[in-house]
Amino acid sequence: MHHRYIGDRAFYRRILGIALPIIIQNGITNFVALLDNIMVGQIGTMPMSAVSIVNQLIFVFNLCIFGASSGAGIFTAQFHGSQDHDGIRHTFRFKVIICTLLTVASTVLFLLFGSSLISFYLRGEGSVQDVALVMDYGKDYMAVMLWGLLPFALSNAYASTLRETGETMVPMLGGVLAVFVNLGLNYVLIFGHFGAPAMGVQGAALATVISRVVELIFVGGWVHLKKANHPFIQGAYRSLYIPGPLLKTIIVKGMPLLLNEFLWSTGLAFIAQCYSTCGLDVVPAVNIANTFCNLGSVVYMSMGNAVGILMGQMLGAGHTKDEIWDSNRKLVILSVFSGIVFGGAMMALSGFFPSLYNTSEPVRHLATKLICISALMMPFQSYTNAAYFTLRSGGQTFITFLFDSCFVWSFCVPLAFILSHFVMLPILPMFILVQGSEILKSFVGAYALSRKKWIQNLTL
């Protein structure tokens, strides 16, 4: 029983070699995002609400970029397992093209409909003056943030390819550098220190844009300077050529991931809008809870990435089905354990964290309760996250599409909409019911994994 669910030291050393740099990068990123959020929160509740709303919209773009890169990344990891550098080059080229196209489309969308999208979250109870303030802050913040979309997209194309080819330290260092640049500039630009003007939410946005440019220069520059270590970059920009059969396979197998991330993130944005109908205080409270929960979920989210990378490499290297299944079972157990540990830590700190914000006592009290509810769901979320990356590693993109975004839109979104618009349920019971859907999703994930259809080599 011990060997069935727990690996040996060599197994965990290999996992840590992949997961630890991702955990460190994501941990520092989310910790600095937490400090960033607290800094904006010091300006007041209205600026914090505005930044939260715009970031919810940009979150959809970020996940689309992630999905587009991940779709091609399935093949990158397996090409790396079979040492096919040409294949890696073609998948990288695809990432650059699709990420650029998505950036152009998203920028146009935000420029044309940004105000309408922000107003979608301002329909709860609140004074006319407060709603107008949030709208003004939101438009100012978005106008600056749009400049950071392309650097973020291109940096993701480089960093994801490096991770999928076993180089996790460089993306980690680039991410760490970026977040500290962001943190330092936030201090200077938001509050006007060292002779700089106090720019408020625009300062927070400018700091984010500059940090993304710094990350792209670091990660992209490293790849180009170390061409011998990264053969895929040699000739990557000489043409836009991608072999027809591979392009077709990436689109068929990988693009459902883009669609999945788009639908999943828009589903979460829609659910957040349903929460906001319970009152204007709900927006900052949910923002505070989500910021803290994002930090608490770093380990199990990073473990999911590690699961996908390791499974992809094992599949590409031709390991037996039993070996892959055994490794996956141990990885899932480890991921769930991390969810239990960090969920408990979140609950223990649920009363302290909201007190760091310059906001009203009702907002702090509500945020505390939302954090506790999210903490209880974290072990289930860690399981479904590991299941998602496992299914994706074997090219089961249609199944992941059903498992992830279809579940959100067929169950969670209708539930939130009915509870908010027809039942008129208060925020706490609504939040419990919507978040509790993760339990049902865990059983769906267990069934999908047990079928073992995801264990297939896509590079043959």
Image (spheres, rainbow, N blue to C red):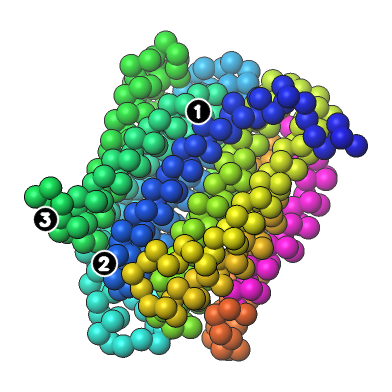
Q: Is residue 411 magenta?
A: no
Q: Is residue 447 magenta?
A: yes
Crowding at dot 1, Cα within 10 Å, few <14 / some 14-19 / many 20+, comes out as many
Residue 403: quarter of image: bottom right
Tag 1: residue type? Thr
The structure residue drawn at horizontal position 60% and vertical position 55%, both measured from the top left corner, is: 345
Tag 3: residue type? Pro
Crowding at dot 3, Cα within 10 Å, few <14 / some 14-19 / many 20+, comes out as few
Q: Relative to 49, does residue 378 appear above or below in the rendering?
A: above
User: Magenta stretch?
Assistant: 430-456
Q: Check disc 3 and report the residue beneath it.
A: 197
Q: Relative to 317, does residue 114 appear above or below in the rendering?
A: below
Tag 2: residue type? Ile
The structure residue drawn at horizontal position 23% and vertical position 46%, both measured from the top left corner, is: 185
Q: Residue furthest right?
A: 1
**What main secondary structure does the magenta stretch of the protein show?**
helix
Q: Check disc 1 and report the residue beneath it.
A: 168
The one of 85 and 245 positioned closer to us in this rendering: 85
Q: CA distance from mark 2 to mark 3?
A: 15 Å
Q: CA distance from mark 2 to mark 1?
A: 36 Å
Quadrant location of the C terminus? top right
**Percent from the top left, x then y, of residue 395?**
66, 38
Crowding at dot 2, Cα within 10 Å, few <14 / some 14-19 / many 20+, comes out as some
